[in-house]
Structures are given as structure tokens and as C-alpha cells.
Image (cartoon, helix red, strand yellow):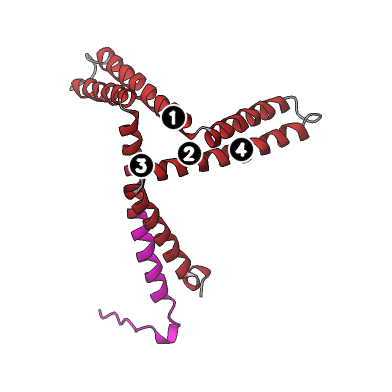
Amino acid sequence: MTSLTRNWWLVVLRGVLAVLFGLAAFLWPGLTWLTLIVLFGIYALVDGFIAVFTGLTHVKDSPRWWVFLLEGLLGIGAGVVAVTWPGLTTLVLLAMIAAWAVLSGVLEIAAAIRLRREITNEWLLVLGGILSIGFGVLLMLQPVAGSLAVIWIIGAYELIFGVVMILLGFRLKNWDVPTHHRPMIHLMR
């Protein structure tokens, strides 16, 4: 027996937790967003402290020790902001996504204009750029709706992933039957 088949119930449990998180994302999106921001903050703090420790312990043997130190301090700062002011973190994150969408849209349109003699249907690239810019502008104008959309995407993913893990777990359980109890499959030629 493998460890995976013996512990099939852990796979099912993982799936159930994912389904519960996915449902929470749809039923309580504000709480889910806050939880994600706080978890990011905790991660950034821990990662920051590890990077600071790494930098300080390599002062003598690495000329770039200060890069780890700086990265760690930035991580600690980001973690403190995320845990202390999760609303500000949400707005900054959404602003970054919006800026990225607008910038990539502008670059897509510029690429389509430059490539119009070399490719056909460059209007599709222009359309993609316009959609990206539109998404970025909408996200800037309606950040709450944008955060809700992100939570719904995460929730949908978690629901689908959870169901897949539950199905896999029960298949592993059925596979865990001792070999002499498994039905024999006879192949006829």
C-alpha cells in the first residue's frame, strides 16, 4: 500500500476544506478578501524576517548581503501594512492590477499598429488592448467590484478543485482494497 492510498481521507479532507473556502468566497466575499490580505501579511512578515536573518548572517561571506537585508525590510514593511491596514493593501493591490491592465493594453495596441503590415487580423490585438484598458479603467473606478470579481474567481477555483480532490480521495479509498480482494480483470484476445 502506498502512503497516498492509506491516507485517502486526507485528500478528501483537503477537498472539503477547499469547497468550504470556495463557498465562503461566494457567501462572505468581504471576509474572504480580508483573510487573504491578512494571510499575505503574515507571509510577508515571516519571509521578511527570514530574508533579514539571511542578510545579517552573510555579512562577512557575501558582498550582496545588503540585498537580502533590504528585501527583508521591505517584506516586513509590506506585512505590517497588510496586517495593520488591510483596506489600504486591497486598494494598492487593485491599483497595481489596474495599472498593469492599462499598460499592457496600450502596449498591445502599439504592437498591433507596428505589426499591421506583417500580420493579418491585427484588429484582434487592438481589441484585446482596448479590453485590457477598459478593464483597468473599470477597476480604478470601481475597486470594490474588482475585488469582488477576484474573490469570485478564487471561490470558483476552490469549489472545482475541492470537488476534484474529494473524487480523487474516494477513488484512492477504493484502490486501497487488498490485492486478493480486488476484482480480477480478464483480458480476452
Q: Gap between marks 2 and 1, in whole Å?
A: 10 Å
The quadrant in which residue 143 appears is top left
**Badge 2 vs badge 1, beta-carbon distance below 8 Å:** yes
Q: Residue at x 57, y 35 (%)?
A: 79
How far across and how far down the image is residue 131, in percent? 24, 25
On whether residue 162 falls in the magenta region, the answer is yes
| Mark earlier in primary sequence (3, 1) | 1
User: How would you classify the magenta stretch by its main secondary structure?
Assistant: helix
Q: Which residues are magenta?
A: 161-189
Is residue 1 depicted above or below 92 in this figure? below
Q: Kindly identify which residue carries mark 3.
A: 151
Q: Amino acid at mark 1?
A: Leu
Q: Amino acid at mark 3?
A: Ile
Q: Gap between marks 3 and 2, in whole Å?
A: 12 Å
Q: Kindly identify which residue carries mark 2.
A: 37
Residue 93, disc: 1
Q: Gap between marks 4 and 2, in whole Å?
A: 12 Å
Q: In this image, 27 relative to 35: left or right?
A: left
Q: Kindly identify which residue carries mark 4.
A: 45
